[in-house]
Image: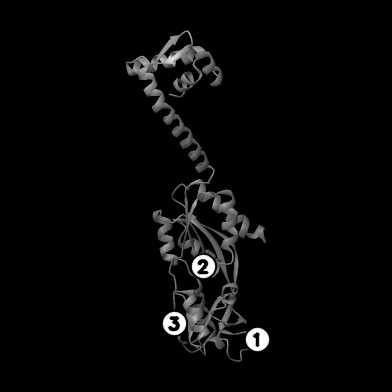
Amino acid sequence: MRYFVEIVRHGSLSAAAKALHMSQPPLSSTVAALESELGVRLLERTGRGVVPTEAGELLMERGEQLVRETDQLAAELKRHGMGVLGSLRLVAYMPYVQTLLPRVLSAYRRVAPAVDIQILDMRPEAALAGLEHGTVDAALMTTSNHELSAQLNRASVNMEQLGSVELVAVLPPRGTWPKAMSWADLAHHTIFAPPVSSRFPGLGNLVLAELAQHVDKRPDVRTVSQHQAVLAQVSAGLGVAVSANSTASNNPGCPVTIRPLAHGQRTLAMELVWPKQRELPESVTRFLGLARSELGPRAR
């Protein structure tokens, strides 16, 4: 079709062959084969060169459109292969990545401007199920135990630790608090904590484990899924919590007091997680590379 269009555009087989960077004989044989296949004459030789027949004019009209669409499709597929088209469905548990994710997305947008980015806030079990079933492409998650999380999910996902997240005690804005809070200090108050996870132990698991180790009595621990709800209740003086340092201190609408933890585990591991059992498009692999370069140990 492209050969035919070029012949009609140039009005000459020799000129079309030159434009197509080929010799004239294969160009002539290709057009002859096309006429034979369609059962209609497409070109006529005149004193002015080669002109389309009535059937050729119809094919030229449709043919130019087909060539344009083919070129456009090829360009889009090429861009898709470079990771600049397609989609990225990313799970990012916002309390732990909201200060880091913009940097990665800004770098990603520069190299993949046409990718449709969807940010999903899911609990660990839902995120892992999405990665396994193909509804999630990648995830930025945190765990209190990298080795255990990797072992529990080794059959379905890959995990790479990018760094660590500092944990602090989050306290009501009014009150006299020690310079550093022990778990025993926290146990005197209602403690708000996220749900525990059986497949990807995180902050909820850490809070219960540290309380069991350092506190004799059974404290009042209440499960709250939403980070903003935790901050609102702590700000109102209803209890205390443990959270990532940066996310707890950057909420002017919910003023709280921040104190370091006196002992025990004081960090969570930041994990880049992606599926193991399926081939990923370039839009996803490019994000994985940027996340490593922007958030990984070398970025520090």
Q: Which numbered disc covers residue 179?
A: 1
For label 3, count other residues whose C-alpha is less than 10 Å away and answer few (under 14), some (14-19) or many (20+): some
**Residue at the far top in the pictured view:** 47
Quadrant of the frame with the C terminus: bottom right
Question: Which label's residue is closer to the chain start, 1 or 2?
Answer: 2
Q: Residue at the spot x=40%, y=60% of the render?
A: 129
Give the structural element (helix, strand or loop) at label 2. Answer: helix
Question: Which label's residue is closer to the chain start, 3 or 1?
Answer: 1
Residue at image mark 3:
222
Instruction: Please tell me how many numbered marks the rendered image carries.
Output: 3
Question: Which label's residue is closer to the chain start, 3 or 2?
Answer: 2
For the residues marked 3 and 1, what is the alpha-carbon distance in whole angstroms? 25 Å
Tag 3 near tag 2, CB within 8 Å: no
Q: For the residue marked with disc 2, what is the amino acid? A: Met
Give the structural element (helix, strand or loop) at label 3. Answer: strand
Q: Nearer the viewer, residue 242 or 44?
A: 44
Q: Residue at the spot x=45%, y=9% of the render?
A: 46
**Residue 257 picture quarter:** bottom right
Tag 1 near tag 2, CB within 8 Å: no
Q: Which numbered disc covers residue 94?
A: 2
For label 2, count other residues whose C-alpha is less than 10 Å away and answer few (under 14), some (14-19) or many (20+): some
Give the structural element (helix, strand or loop) at label 1. Answer: loop
**Residue 184 picture quarter:** bottom right
Q: Position of residue 267 (x, y in %)?
A: 59, 72
Q: Which numbered disc covers residue 123?
A: none
Q: Nearer the viewer, residue 100 or 13?
A: 13
Q: For the residue marked with disc 1, what is the amino acid? A: Lys
